[in-house]
């Protein structure tokens, strides 16, 4: 998602390098030579446009820590990524205690910088949601979730029950499905709604800082530890601690995390006694933790301690009922932020196109596609042409919204997109074989129900043969997206070209 990044560094070479990297990531960049310029910009009328700040710690005049303190005093919540050539633990901890969301060491690699910006944008979005919830006079709750899907409603019911308990919760789901928003809804529905909600992205913390960030450290516990740091567990005391991407936590830290979860107490680095904490623990992961346990990358005892109350957030392709309301909501929000002078709508044709796509990046990808379409659109209504990448994936050679009308049937009036009354679609190159009776056996020779995977494999093979290997048509008739069809073909080892050659040879 394109964002506005403010770069603050007194080194002109470093400023140019960072500006080039930010623009390469397709974000807008503004530069400031020192802390005074940065504060003037952030406190001025243009400050509301800034989504992320990349801040050098070592500068003449007001240094990075001074800027962070001034931002905190003025309640400016823009996420800050700090950078310095001196990558000591104490420096990083001091900056994060002062309000920074991430820390990079000069010279930061492009991948590390992009990861930090992505993480900061996620924090910025959640801060925005929290501020909007505050203006409405209530905490973020399940009423704020946009869903019409039965699959998602099951997850919501589980979440509502989980909100009434303090047992550990594990939220599972693919990247981009909204696990952190769901965790905030759990907190907002429980008795800790007015208490702290502390988020830790376990995949974004440098490995040598994990224990200090999570559990804190005492003054003098290691070289350069000039101040005491409480740690995220203590910060979340009486509230909720959300450990995002728990599957990326190093094995060494998992040992101490297990004790913290079991005993309700943490051992600060260099501390002489434990610190009691009262938290509601919510973990989240996009990984298969059980497989990680088998592979030796995740402790089995910690897995069973965290997996007390699992909640699975279904991917967007399994809750297509949510695509339309989400698209409308995201378009309204994006237009309000980026094009406040005009009202943006999403046309029914565009909605049908979005509903036909599988969205491997889930809600986050949908949001990016909506924002990109608003930038491309020249009118007040988003059309299929404003989603060229999605359209190419879904349609192939199909033409949407051409001279034909939706009342003209295509092969017995079947819709172009599964689950939607789509306009007419013309495909002159598709010539299915003559109608033939094909019986799918539901029972095996012993009278038992055949496995679903076997039946699915048989149906995919039949559809590929029936539609002469035209995979776009096969996916449409089976009611799935092309990317889903390709994934299933890979899982089942189906190679339509090789199988056709084999049939012809025989």
Image: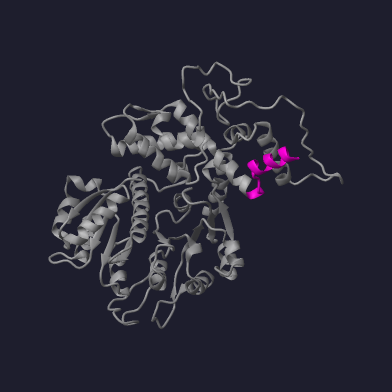
Q: Quadrant of the N terminus?
A: top left
> Magenta region's main secondary structure?
helix
Residue 359 drawn at (x, y percent): 49, 42
Q: Which residues are magenta?
A: 491-506
Q: Residue 95, located in which quarter of the rendered image? A: bottom left
Residue 266 drawn at (x, y percent): 45, 74
Q: Left or right: 121 with respect to 437?
A: left
Residue 273 drawn at (x, y percent): 42, 81
Report the front residue among 460 and 169. Answer: 460
Please report the residue visible at 50 percent of the width from the left and 17 percent of the height from the top. 404
Residue 318 drawn at (x, y percent): 57, 42
Q: Is residue 487 above or below residue 351?
A: below
Q: Can residue 150 be found in the magenta stretch?
A: no
Please report the residue visible at 62 percent of the width from the left and 66 percent of the height from the top. 294
Q: Left or right: 259 with respect to 82?
A: right
Q: How many marks?
A: 0
Report the front residue among 129 and 2. Answer: 2
Q: Left or right: 430 with respect to 342?
A: right
Q: How is the image coloured?
A: one colour
Q: Quadrant of the C terminus?
A: top right
Please report the residue visible at 60 percent of the width from the left and 62 percent of the height from the top. 291
Q: Is residue 101 above or below residue 156?
A: below
Report the front residue among 4 and 42. Answer: 4
């Amino acid at each position: 998602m394109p964002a506005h990044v403010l770069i603050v560094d007194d080194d002109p070479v470093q400023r140019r390098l960072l500006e080039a990297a930010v623009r390469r990531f397709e974000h807008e960049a503004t530069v400031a030579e020192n802390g005074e310029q940065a504060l003037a910009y952030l406190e001025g009328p243009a400050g509301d446009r800034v989504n992320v700040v990349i801040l050098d710690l070592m500068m003449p005049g007001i240094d990075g820590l001074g800027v962070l303190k001034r931002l905190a005093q003025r309640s400016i919540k823009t996420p800050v990524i700090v950078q310095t050539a001196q990558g000591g633990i104490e420096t990083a901890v001091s900056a994060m205690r002062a309000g920074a969301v991430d820390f990079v060491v000069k010279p930061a690699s492009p991948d590390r910088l992009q990861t930090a910006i992505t993480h900061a944008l996620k924090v910025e979005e959640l801060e925005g949601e929290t501020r909007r919830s505050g203006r409405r006079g209530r905490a973020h709750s399940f009423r704020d979730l946009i869903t019409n899907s039965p699959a998602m409603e099951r997850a919501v019911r589980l979440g509502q029950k989980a909100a009434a308990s303090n047992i550990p919760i594990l939220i599972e789901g693919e990247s981009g499905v909204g696990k952190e928003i769901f965790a905030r809804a759990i907190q907002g529905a429980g008795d800790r709604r007015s208490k702290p909600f502390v988020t830790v992205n376990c995949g974004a913390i440098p490995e040598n800082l994990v224990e200090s960030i999570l559990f804190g450290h005492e003054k003098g516990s290691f070289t350069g530890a000039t101040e005491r740091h409480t740690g995220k567990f203590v910060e979340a005391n009486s509230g909720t601690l959300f450990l995002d991407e728990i599957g990326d936590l190093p094995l060494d830290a998992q040992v101490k995390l297990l004790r913290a979860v079991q005993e309700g107490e943490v051992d600060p680095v260099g501390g002489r006694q434990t610190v009691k904490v009262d938290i509601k623990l919510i973990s989240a992961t996009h990984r298969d933790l059980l497989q990680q346990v088998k592979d030796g990358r995740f402790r089995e005892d910690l897995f069973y301690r965290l997996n007390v109350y699992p909640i699975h957030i279904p991917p967007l392709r399994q809750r297509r009922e949510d695509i339309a309301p989400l698209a409308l909501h995201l378009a309204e929000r994006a237009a309000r932020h980026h094009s406040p002078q005009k009202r943006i709508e999403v046309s029914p044709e565009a909605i049908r196109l979005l509903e036909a796509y599988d969205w491997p990046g889930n809600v986050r990808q949908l949001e990016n596609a909506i924002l990109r379409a608003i930038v491309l659109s020249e009118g007040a209504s988003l059309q299929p042409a404003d989603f060229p990448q999605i359209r190419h994936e879904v349609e192939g050679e199909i033409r949407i919204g051409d001279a034909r009308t939706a009342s003209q049937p295509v092969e017995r009036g079947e819709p172009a997109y599964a689950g939607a009354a789509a306009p007419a679609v013309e495909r002159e190159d598709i010539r299915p074989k003559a109608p033939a009776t094909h019986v799918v056996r539901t029972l095996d020779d012993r009278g038992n129900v055949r496995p679903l995977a076997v039946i699915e494999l048989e149906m995919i093979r039949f559809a590929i043969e029936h539609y002469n290997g035209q995979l776009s048509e096969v996916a449409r008739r089976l009611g799935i997206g092309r990317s889903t069809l390709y994934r299933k073909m890979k899982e089942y080892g189906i190679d339509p070209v090789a199988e056709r050659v084999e049939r012809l040879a025989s």
